[in-house]
Image (cartoon, rainbow, N blue to C red):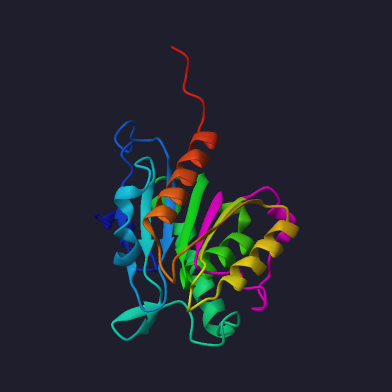
Amino acid sequence: MDKEKGANLNLAHMVRPSATEGDATDKAVPGLLLLHGRGADEGDLMSLEGALDPRFTVVSARAPLRLGPGFAWYGMAPVGFPDDAAMHSSLDELHKFIEGLMPAYNLDPAQLYLMGFSQGAVMSAAVALTMPERVRGVVMHSGYVPVESGLDFKLSEVAGKPFFLAHGLYDEVIPVNFARQSREYLTEMNVGLTYQEYPIGHGISEESLDDFSEWLSAELDRNSPAAPHE
């Protein structure tokens, strides 16, 4: 999980290279950017990398705000109303990070996927809706679309973009109703939506991990160039 190539990027991060990276030195590979939840760090979601498609170069980024022993993307506020100033600042940092990520790790600019949990899911939605030209698809786990944050969503450009929303029925941190509201919002935007609820609290279960990992692999299969004929 060496990150020497991205030493100059603005956010601390961990990297798992694509298994296909050595096939051709100039061949760009699909990327998966992981965004952790409040109080965690880049090692949290990277612990899932063994379940993620080996074709991805997986990058797990650290949020910029210190919170106890961990980090956060924005300050505490009532659920559904993030601290706008901190969120906008973190979003700017993510935009910059993503622009540098492509050349640093030779990622295919047409195949960058996001996967976020909790605050990271909120930020994943924010990134995808403010810079849809850079994001191929999104997994949002235990989060919501931050529609009240005053962000400049490019809604005319997100039709058909694949989203996978996963949420626990018994989530005590972000109640499932927020996911259902996001489902309605994204449905109105005509995205390619897959929505799943699970009998869990605020966390990722083996079942939800299997489901979104399979979804990501299916998206790669759908969007990868056809193999050349022999």
Most extreme residue toward the top is 230
**Do we see residue 143 in this rendering?**
yes
Which residues fall within the magenta stretch?
136-161
Query: In the image, residue 23 lies at what x, y percent?
Result: 32, 31
Q: Quadrant of the C terminus?
A: top left
Give the percent coordinates (x, y) of residue 100. Answer: 44, 58
Picture quadrant of residue 184: bottom right
Q: Is residue 27 left or right of residue 132?
A: left
Image height check: is 203 above or below 210? below
Q: Is residue 110 above or below residue 135?
A: above
* Residue 108 visible at all: no
Quadrant for residue 5, please give it: bottom left
State the residue at coordinates (40%, 35%): 27
Please check the rendered image and state whether residue 149 is part of the magenta-colored stretch, yes or no.
Answer: yes
Residue located 33% across and 43% down the image:
18
| Dominant SS in magenta | loop
In the orientation shown, which residue stands out farthest toward the front?
A: 199
Q: Is residue 52 magenta?
A: no
Please identify the quadrant where the N terminus is shown: bottom left
**Towards the viewer: 210 or 1:** 210
Q: Residue at x 33, y 58 (%)?
A: 6
Looking at the picture, how far across and down is residue 9, in whole percent? 38, 64
Q: Nearer the viewer, residue 171 or 88?
A: 171
- Where is residue 132 shown, x and y percent of the image? 62, 56
Q: How many marks?
A: 0
User: In the figure, is residue 133 to the left or right of 190?
Assistant: left
